[in-house]
Amino acid sequence: MSQANIKEIIKAEYIKCATDPVHFFRKYCYITHTTKGRVLFHLYPFQEEVLSDFRANRFSIINKSRQLGISTLVAGYSLWLMLFNKDKTILCIATKQETARGMVEKVQFMYENLPSWLKGNIKPMANNKLSFQLANNSRIVATSAASDAGRSYAVSLLLVDEAAFIEGIDRIYTSIKPTIATGGGMIALSSPNGVGNWFHKMYTEAEIGKNDFKAIKLKWDLHPDRDAAWEERERANMSPREFAQEYDCDFLGSGNSVIEPDTLTFYEQTFIQEPVERRFMGGDFWIWQYADYSKQYLVCADVARGDGSDYSSFHVIDATTCEQVAEYKSQIDTRTYGNMLVSVATEYNNALLIVENANIGWDVVNTIIEKGYPNMYYSPRSYGEMHMDKWLDKMESNQTVPGFTTSVKTRPLVISKMEAYIRDKQFIFHSKRLLEELRVFIWQHGKAQAQSGYNDDLVMSLGIGLFTRDTAMKFYEQGMNLTRAAVDGIVKTGGEGEYYGPSLPNGQLNPYMINNGHGQFEDMTWLLG
């Protein structure tokens, strides 16, 4: 074959590689296989589809199973862009610099195994472990996740590897977005890491078309070598949460949430419903059941810190059935909030009003005291162990403070009580707002708290209410006066001529009625269960 013919063949092949990356991969791009060593990169059908998505969309976000070869595909796509385009800068960000460097090393390996007529030249002194640059001035650079990552680059393509696990990725994205807004692109890939983080938000918004990303979901079963037997083996060696994270692309199942995702799904399908009324300015007070004057209620409230980052919130709970009947969440000044709480608690039969008293919570508590509300909850000055005799001793010796005191001792108890009520489905709630808070209420650094960027105001106010219902109110049944009002006592059936209070629906006398000293009787039968 003549030299001219060879040149024509190479030219035609070069053009085909430049226009068809699948052809380029299959014929000339070598990768390292875990068991087979160096092999040509023959794409699976799902990998070809993903590659088409890269070419058709400037922004792609991939929720993927592990070991599907997507990182390798991204590396190959990066090399293809660099070889056949001038002045491309590809920036790879990962959780650690070593992880980002792995992407650069994959590109280098592929390049080094190309035939010489495809290689071109490497730019002198530009090749090292963290960067790789060609003579056409196209390059790939690796960096660790930092808030200023990418600021000094005019980025053509931003690669974010394991995006769900990068601390502060939202700030990095905000800082680098202007550099890709004028024609650049971005590929974010990760297995899921619970809900509420940047990756979860961007992916779910992409699914419904609320941002510019193309959402790509790649579950374990796309790989042709994986079948039901493979799944069974993997599940046997992993927890459900680990499998959900590593293989099932399941945001809810992959998280470290305090409440199990399956439980929250049950609540969503069974109890979540729109309120029958939205009241107050902004409609932030949601009502599912109006006050029933034969029932006893409690109102449990959390107070915003006052820095604008969280919300004041409260629940109205039917103390007998343990069902949420109303809920409020908004930003409001403390005096208005205190007046609102008195109004709502009064409407719901002078409900036991429980207000968290930390920080500016005292302003709300003082407003309630000034209004003379008769049924406010008081806390022991120190809790110690939760025994009735010690509790009553503190109450009788006036060792109390108005409101609920959250401390390092009580906070874990509050959360544990709430988790147990919901896990055992003993508490019924209807609020979408509460459901969303519970989904991002996670174990982080050994502490239960809202995921970064979210709030847990409704969660904590609920926990305080359920904790109080299950402890202090049961002690109350045995003689404790939490309301600071005169309690005549529990009237029990006795001899002829005694006063028993209102009768039961069947006409019999109710042996468990409390006269609260204001001419009102409260049915305390539920406390004995």
Image: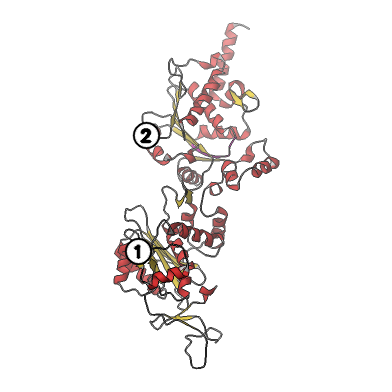
Q: Callout 1: 10 Å neighbours few (<14), some, many (20+)?
A: few
For the point 47% across and 59% down, the residue is 413
Quadrant occupied by the C terminus: bottom right
- The amino acid at mark 2 is Asp
- Which tag, 2 or 1, sits closer to the chain's start? 2
Percent coordinates x, y for residue 106 in the rendering: 53, 25
Secondary structure of the residue carrying tag 2 is loop
Q: Is residue 232 above or below residue 117?
A: below
Q: Nearer the viewer, residue 486 or 252?
A: 486
Spatial CA span between label 2 and label 1: 41 Å
Which residue corresponds to mark 2? 148
Element marked by disc 1: helix
Q: Pointer 2: residues within 10 angstroms few (<14), some, or many (20+)?
A: few
Quarter of the image for residue 72 reads top right
Query: From the viewer's perspective, is the residue at label 2 or at label 1 nearer?
Result: 2
Q: Which mark is residue 281?
A: 1
Is residue 180 in view? yes
Task: Decide if residue 288 is in sight here.
Answer: no
Confirm whether the magenta stretch covers residue 65: yes
Q: Is residue 174 magenta?
A: no
Residue 393, image x and y in percent? 41, 71
Query: Which stretch did the figure color magenta?
Result: 60-67
Q: Amino acid at mark 1?
A: Met
Residue 434 x/y as whole percent? 46, 58
Instruction: Identify which residue is drawn at 52% across, 22% down.
Output: 108
